[in-house]
Image (cartoon, rainbow, N blue to C red):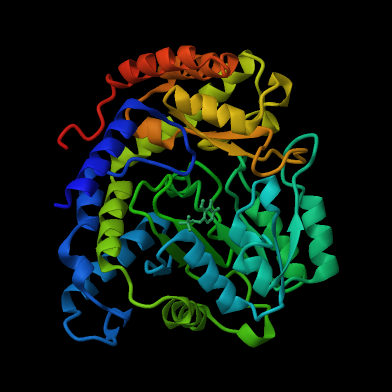
């Protein structure tokens, strides 16, 4: 193997082993998931869908893709699933291109309030090709401003309402959003990239009976390979409102399939699809239920411990796997916090808090998530120690020697939670 890359992979493995990984969108996929990604399936071109390919020799990858689809349908009890999107952003690009025409209006949560780039940011295709109207969270509570969402929807009559977020620690009222959408014949898309693994185990509200289309990534709480998926429920409670998209699930499935390929992608990554199938089987396993429970318990305990130390948590807590810490009362920016924690072997990302007075580059906050440390086996009684490390690093953020010493303590602590011992 390429010795330079081999060494870099080893360095990254050591970094992952010794650190405390708190990036909310990251996880540690199983070795089975990882090894399947590195399989010879990468050699195969398979443009099209199972049974309808543009290349010969697809009989095996057809089975692989059908298996991934059927397992995904089983997890969420849905009628339609597309497992080809290369990423979450690709899944969203496909859906937007399927249900909107250029310049059409849609509604999404503002990026600076916790939304995602693909929900209408001006620097993203979603903000350039279409006309996004953005809703926000309440300044005082940090909760989604559903009243504003409704007012903006009734005023602007978007064709699509997107719900879901990258940095929102509370559950969503999908039913309420659907009621708004029905008044203006809009479609609703839920992007569950972050909480999908918790929704899979019924620990959060299900979007499926209310939202026409659901997208997700597969590498966050679902703990699979890096990738995207698109799903739809058995049938829609109400017929489609859009006059040019009137129809049933079958028609909509065809539209979405075509939007993925050939609309926005070329050949599917069958090695990744195989790895998705492996991850989906793991999600179906009973052990994933306790994993998902542990995630929520860990996140809630971490929020509680942080609050004890005077940290402000946006929305005052969490329902899911993540939280946003507003550091303004601690006199440190998100950027400084990210760097200091990094020196101590604790990985987080700086994040704007709602109504932030600082730029996205500096930020007043950090986002913290527990899916990765929960995969390493950390339990609720370990959260006190993690919060202590975080607090020590932030309090001593100007003292590089102290942070270096803390990094050794962190590494020692994490030795009790082995990562990929067979590698
Ligand atoms: C809500 C949401 N949607 C979509 C994405 C995009 O996923 P990807 O990075 O796989 O393109 C993310 C990634 O962070 C996300 O948080």
393 or 132: nearer the eye?
Answer: 393
303 displayed left or right of 6 = right
How many marks do you count on the picture?
Answer: 0
Examine the rendered structure and indicate whether residue 10 appears above or below residue 262. above
259 or 192: nearer the eye?
Answer: 259
Residue 98: quadrant of the picture: bottom right
Residue 65 screen position, x and y as percent: 27, 69
Residue 367: quadrant of the picture: top right
Residue 406 screen position, x and y as percent: 43, 14
Residue in the image at 80% along x and 34% along y? 140
Residue in the image at 26% along x and 83% along y? 51
Examine the rendered structure and indicate whether residue 29 appears above or below residue 266. above
Residue in the image at 57% along x and 84% along y? 247
Q: Is residue 210 visible?
A: no
Residue in the image at 22% along x and 35% along y? 420
Residue 41 screen position, x and y as percent: 19, 67
Q: Quadrant of the C terminus?
A: top left
Q: Is residue 236 visible?
A: yes
Residue 416: quadrant of the picture: top left
293 displayed left or right of 422 = right
289 or 56: nearer the eye?
Answer: 56
331 displayed left or right of 195 = right
Residue 170 screen position, x and y as percent: 62, 40
């Amino acid at each position: 193997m390429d010795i330079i890359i081999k060494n870099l992979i080893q360095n990254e493995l050591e970094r992952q082993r010794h650190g405390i990984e708190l990036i909310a969108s990251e996880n540690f996929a199983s070795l089975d998931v990882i090894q399947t990604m590195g399989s010879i399936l990468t050699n195969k071109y398979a443009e099209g869908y199972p049974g309808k390919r543009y290349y010969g020799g697809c009989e095996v990858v057809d089975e692989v893709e059908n298996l991934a689809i059927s397992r995904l349908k089983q997890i969420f009890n849905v009628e339609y699933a597309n497992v080809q999107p290369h990423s979450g952003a690709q899944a969203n690009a496909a859906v937007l291109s399927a249900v909107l025409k250029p310049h059409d209006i849609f509604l999404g949560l503002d990026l600076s309030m916790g939304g995602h780039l693909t929900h209408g940011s001006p620097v993203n295709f979603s903000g350039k090709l279409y006309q996004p109207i953005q809703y926000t969270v309440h300044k005082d509570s940090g909760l989604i401003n559903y009243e504003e969402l409704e007012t903006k929807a009734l005023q602007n009559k978007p064709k699509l309402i997107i719900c879901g977020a990258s940095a929102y620690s509370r559950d969503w009222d999908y039913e309420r959003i659907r009621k708004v959408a029905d008044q203006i014949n809009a479609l609703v898309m839920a992007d569950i990239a972050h909480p999908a693994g918790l929704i899979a185990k019924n620990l959060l509200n299900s979007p499926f009976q209310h939202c026409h289309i659901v997208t997700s990534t597969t590498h966050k709480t679902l703990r699979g390979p890096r990738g995207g998926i698109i799903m739809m429920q058995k049938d829609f409670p109400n017929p489609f409102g859009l006059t040019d998209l009137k129809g049933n699930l079958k028609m909509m499935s065809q539209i979405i399939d075509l939007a993925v390929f050939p609309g926005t992608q070329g050949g599917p990554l069958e090695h990744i699809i195989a790895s998705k199938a492996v991850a989906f089987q793991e999600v179906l396993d009973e052990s994933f239920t306790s994993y998902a429970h542990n995630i929520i318990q860990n996140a809630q305990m971490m929020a509680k411990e942080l609050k004890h130390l005077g940290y402000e948590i946006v929305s005052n807590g969490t329902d899911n796997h993540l939280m946003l810490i507003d550091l303004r009362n601690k006199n440190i920016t998100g950027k400084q916090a990210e760097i200091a924690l990094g020196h101590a072997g604790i990985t987080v990302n700086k994040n704007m808090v709602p109504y932030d007075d600082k730029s996205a580059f500096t930020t007043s906050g950090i986002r913290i998530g527990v899916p990765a440390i929960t995969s390493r086996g950390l339990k609720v009684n370990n959260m006190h120690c993690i919060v202590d490390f975080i607090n020590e690093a932030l309090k001593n953020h100007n003292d590089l020697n102290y942070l270096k010493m803390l990094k050794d303590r962190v590494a020692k602590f994490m030795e009790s939670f082995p990562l990929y011992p067979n590698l």
